[in-house]
Image (spheres, helix red, strand yellow):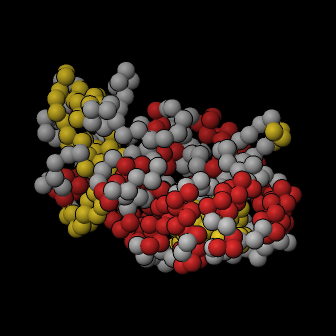
Amino acid sequence: MTTERDKLRERLERATAHLDPPYAVVDLAAFDANAVALTDRAAGKPLRLASKSIRSRALVGRALGRPGWRGVMAFTLAEAIWLARSGVTDDVLVAYPTVDRAALAELTGDATLARTVTLMVDDPGQLDLVDAVRAPAGRPEVRVCLDLDASWRPLGARVHIGVRRSPVHSARAAGAFAAAVTRRPGFTLVGLMAYEAQIAGLGDAPPGQAALGAAIRAVQRRSYRELLARRGAAVRAVREHADLEFVNGGGTGSVAATSADPAVTEVTAGSGLYGPALFDGYRGWRPTPAAYFACAVVRRPTPGMVTVHGGGWVASGPPATSRLPTPWLPAGLRMVGSEGAGEVQTPLTGPGAVGLRVGDRVWFRHAKAGELCERVNELHLVVGDEVVDTVPTYRGEGRAFL
């Protein structure tokens, strides 16, 4: 019986029969459907596009052209300046603090850029660095956003659940930092961000681990309730000192929950457009897989095993099998535990390997979203069984920001 995955494989192979692996494709129907689904989950609040999850100007622009998407969250200041100067967006929030002096000099020397780009801050030293690059009297006002740590600390500093981000954790600390920013010439505090990684970035239904999934969901429920109160209090404390334009939160994994927070005015999303393999471990919403990469079978070590050339496109994060790419098409493939995903070769076994021959393609899904684009210069955009366009990735445009 022909399955949906069989049909997908046939369609992708017809579309890319003229290409030599390795290469990457984006299924535009799935990409667009994911964009619509994310806006539906945002329930009327605008979505800010996380560019690190896309890393192609053409596809960043495609998403921003859809209703409900507004502005970009960049991962470096240099990237933010590039996107602004190239006309992709006139609203860029840099997600992480920067110490890039050259980029700061460019930002503070251009009034239009200064109105377009917002820097992330959580430490007075970051403001000092801006002043050292260009003194307040010789530059336009620099827009800044306060990064509020959204991790959960049920037992105070002894337990930290979430990622290590800002030192500003309490509403009181947020208010004090806001007061300090507003007292300094040359800066305008326009936003607050609180990224709840322990909710948005952690799958609550890890395959084959029901007990762990239940524990994760319990932690996420309690963390959400705590953050709901603390984020609201922090916003009120900051608004005593600054007229905030936006309060940003969330990620693809928490769009619906974060949108329900009355203190939040916009939600960040990006990974869900590509639908990488890590999102197979989420219960609330699983995007349709849209991005794939193909590797060629180059040998058959045994009748039940094939080897593809390359394949070791491993994602960042904790060292675990969840960071390996997933062999997706044909179905029934798995990596060999003693080798995993290799730099120049990846052996695969399982029922799906039996029918493969030298020259056939194996289609993988990357564990994460935008990191796939660091491996290829271009993305082939597929509609139905045709490649309708080929667009460059950041790498393909000669841009490597991290």
The structure residue drawn at horizontal position 16% and vertical position 48%, both measured from the top left corner, is 20
Question: How many numbered discs sit on the rendered protein?
Answer: 0
Side (left or right) of 392 relative to 47: left
Indicate the quadrant where residue 146 lies. Answer: bottom right
* Position above or below: 321 against 83: above
Question: Where residue 45 appears, x then y in whole percent?
Answer: 62, 73
In the image, 119 versus 218, the foreground residue is: 119
Question: Where residue 247 appears, x then y in whole percent?
Answer: 69, 68
Question: Where residue 373 appears, x then y in whole percent?
Answer: 36, 52
* Position above or below: 59 against 225: below
Side (left or right) of 174 relative to 270: right
* Position above or below: 313 against 92: above
In the image, 120 versus 221, the foreground residue is: 120
Q: Can the viewer see residue 54?
A: yes
Q: Can the viewer see residue 287?
A: no
The structure residue drawn at horizontal position 33% and vertical position 56%, both measured from the top left corner, is 398
* Position above or below: 365 against 246: above
The structure residue drawn at horizontal position 20% and vertical position 46%, both measured from the top left corner, is 21
Question: Where residue 269 appears, x then y in whole percent?
Answer: 54, 62
The structure residue drawn at horizontal position 65% and vertical position 44%, both measured from the top left corner, is 163
